[in-house]
Amino acid sequence: MCGLAGFIDFNKVSKLSDLKIMTDVLHHRGPDDSGYDFFELQNVNIGLGHRRLSILDLSKHGHQPMKFNEFTIVYNGEIYNFKEIRDELKKFNYSFDSDSDTEVILKAYHKWGVNSVKKFNGMFLIVIYDNMKNKIIIIRDRAGVKPCYYYHYNGLILFSSELKSFHKHSDFIKKINYSSLADYLQYGYILEPHSIFENTYKLESGSYIQIDLNTKQLNKSKYWDVIDFYNKPKLIINEEEAIEEIERLMISSFNYRMVSDVPVGVFLSGGYDSSIVTAILQSNKTERINTFTIGFEEKKFDEAPYAKAVANNLGTNHTEYYCRQKDALEIIPKLCEIYDEPFGDPSSIPTILVSKLARKNVTVSLSADGGDEIFAGYSKYDLCLNYLNIFNKIPVRLRSKLVSIMSSLNPNKIPYFNSTYNFETKYFKAINTLKAKDSIEMLKLTSQHFTSNQISNLLKTQIKTNKSNFDLYLSNNNDSLNKMLAIDFRTYMVDDVLTKVDRATMSVGLEGREPLMDYRLIEFSAQLPSKLKYKNGVKKHLLKQITHKYLPKKMMNRPKKGFGVPITDWFRDELKEYLMTYLSRDRLEKENIFNVDEILLLRNRFINGDNQSARRLWFIFIFELWYEKWMK
């Protein structure tokens, strides 16, 4: 794994000392080694910094920055097929001094240039300085497993695995991007390419940036996009053929991600995704795999017994830990250090806990994220399709009239319904979804925790809506379900799920690997008809059929819980003091960001028993924690 940071300063102000503190703030990502290269050229100062977590070739030969001829590289991630690429390069008379994948990347780039990235199967953030062509290239992996931020303003370019590096540079201007804040409040995360700060961006997944050091031009290109594969004609294939190919790809992908010179484990929830990863890996090994699970005392959130049953059936070396309110209380003050832009997914808490648990025994752990987005597992897809089916039966004129009437009513004054869970938000969402043209717009609207009108009431600043990956084009080769899967992959998957796992694992120096994020598996699934993924009302049909080969169907067939967190209970108990402190009138008025009365109304309604506000209050609460950490 590792972390990297650096600068390209055309003002020639940045120094080696700046590079060191920008890099060393990422110590948690790479506690084993550090390296810094500083180049003072005629028109620009360049800094390349690296923190290393030793996974492959634990010797000093894996040290970065690494050089070969005119190239210098810093790199974060893993190239799982590096041995095959190394063998190919040897045929062109390349020799190797190490067993590291870093050296393979460097020499592959020397041979094939930026096209070398198409050979890489892995997760990565790569920065290469070419001193002959006087350019720098920054490349992010296809799915976006590894993060990349960059700041570009007034002759200064900063780049890093995490935003916290930028705060260590004296010329970084931290000005909140209120359109990104609005996105955060709506979704609980900020959509790429945007970040919480102005002039600061995420390099989009499957993209690279080239910076010409002579002209100072920055050009961004895309080398891979899941949308391209969804837009291809669907494969003519039967279910048996699809299952056979998916299982073959899974076995290959999962085995790749066990390649390591340090101990490896698996996060096991007991659901289908983590269970099939564990089952396939354990079926090919004589030694017991290490598996790790977090449970909850609140039974409706607790999946630990299911994970234990799977572990017992497969014979893994299983460890579990139950998350209690005291654990949450210890982690919550650290959330905004770990997630250094506002991040509202409360399942980050158990993800950090399970990472800590695993790190006691292993240095690498597999996390089975992506099954729901790739194979159609979320209930929200049902919801959107059902809404579309109902609304499409209503004539357009009548729908417009319904929208007009509903918009004129106050949902809090509608008898009976106003006391049901989350009714106000559901009511405004219903108004918006009545206007939805297709499944993508429906998915976008149902994913929002605050409606656009509510955001306008909440923030003092007038907001210009960010263009986002919810606006991507899907061809008619896709039906409504496949369109939602494609967009969910480019939004929720990369900006929420992968962000959550990367920061949580790296916060304790644990490398998190994503076996379902193998690009071959993603590309194949994208080209499958949705009727194979969601069959006769059964979500994740193909993945479930494969799982039942390895585990009893009776054991696996149960309602999906997801990785939920009991924040409603916690806010009413030990976290109530936090809520009252961070959402107080004095604090909010000093910041001058929110219409304070709107937030206090939400807070007081929740305290008086209205559960509908819990997730929205959590988003605001997390922003307040973040603001205190990074803006004061």
Image (cartoon, rainbow, N blue to C red):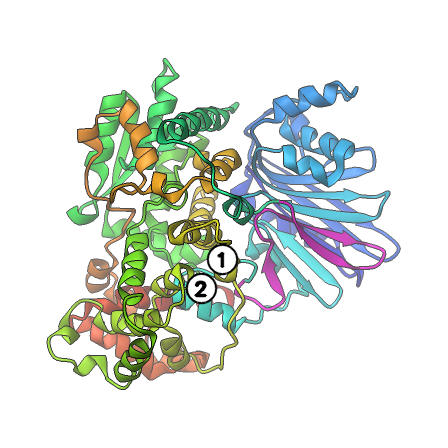
Number of marks in the rendered image: 2
Who's the residue at 37% across and 56% down the image?
A: 345
- Depth order, front residue of 622/449: 449
Label 2 Cα crowd, 10 Å radius (few <14 / some 14-19 / many 20+): many
Q: Is residue 217 magenta?
A: yes
Say whether residue 143 is visible: yes
- Depth order, front residue of 163/497: 497
Give above or below for 135 relative to 264.
below
Residues marked 1 and 2 touching at CB (< 8 Å): yes
Give the secondary structure at mark 2: helix
Label 1 Cα crowd, 10 Å radius (few <14 / some 14-19 / many 20+): some
Residue 521 drawn at (x, y percent): 47, 34
Looking at the picture, which amino acid does disc 2 mark?
Trp
For residue 157, what is the image quadrant?
bottom right
Magenta residues, as a range?
Answer: 195-223
Q: Which quadrant holds the N terminus?
A: top right
Residue 4 drawn at (x, y percent): 62, 45
Give above or below for 76 relative to 619.
above
Who's the residue at 74% across and 58% down the image?
A: 218
On the rendered structure, is 582 left or right of 54? left
Q: Which residue is mark 2?
A: 626
On the rendered structure, is 159 left or right of 213? left
Q: Which residue is mark 1?
A: 340
